[in-house]
């Protein structure tokens, strides 16, 4: 697993940071949204005004620690990127890519 982004979270729950891969290098925000059903995402991921993904709040089985499970997609990508946004040391958040 590789770290592909870093974020900070403000008081309103909005994450601000950047995502860097071989094909993406963008400043991004992850904003909470109201859910209209059980399967709807808890967050939407934006690069500027363009939506590039969605996120669901999950909890780790062993520790109960909350994290965001993200699905990022863009026409330049061969397939979607699945990643987890987890809290690191000092209040920062790390975007970890997984296959």
Image (cartoon, grey):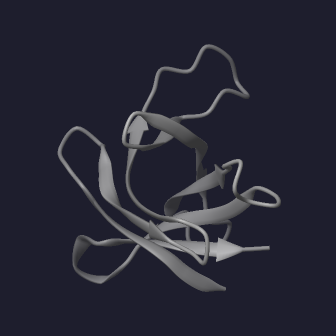
Q: Residue furthest left?
A: 11
Q: How many marks?
A: 0
Position in image of residue 84 (x %, y %): 59, 65
Near-viewer residue (68 or 96): 96
Residue at 70% of width from left, 24% of height from top?
Answer: 38
Near-viewer residue (39 or 81): 81
For the N terminus, give its image quadrant.
bottom right
Near-viewer residue (43 or 27): 27
Residue at 48% of width from left, 20% of height from top?
Answer: 34
| Left or right: 95 in relation to 15 | right
Residue at 61% of width from left, 53% of height from top?
Answer: 70
From the viewer's perspective, is residue 56 above or below residue 66?
above
Residue at 59% of width from left, 57% of height from top?
Answer: 59
Residue 42 appears in which quarter of the rendering? top right
| Left or right: 85 in relation to 58 | left
For the C terminus, give its image quadrant.
bottom right
| Left or right: 84 in relation to 86 | right
From the viewer's perspective, is residue 48 above or below residue 49?
below
């Amino acid at each position: 697993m590789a770290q592909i982004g870093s974020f900070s979270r403000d008081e309103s729950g909005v994450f601000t940071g950047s995502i860097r891969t071989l094909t993406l290098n963008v400043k991004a925000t992850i904003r909470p949204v109201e859910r209209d059903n059980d399967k709807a995402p808890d967050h939407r991921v934006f690069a500027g005004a363009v939506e590039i993904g969605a996120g669901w709040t999950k909890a780790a089985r062993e520790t109960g620690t909350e994290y965001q499970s993200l699905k990022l997609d863009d026409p330049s990508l061969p397939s979607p990127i699945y990643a987890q946004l987890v809290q690191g040391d000092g209040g920062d958040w790390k975007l970890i890519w997984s296959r």
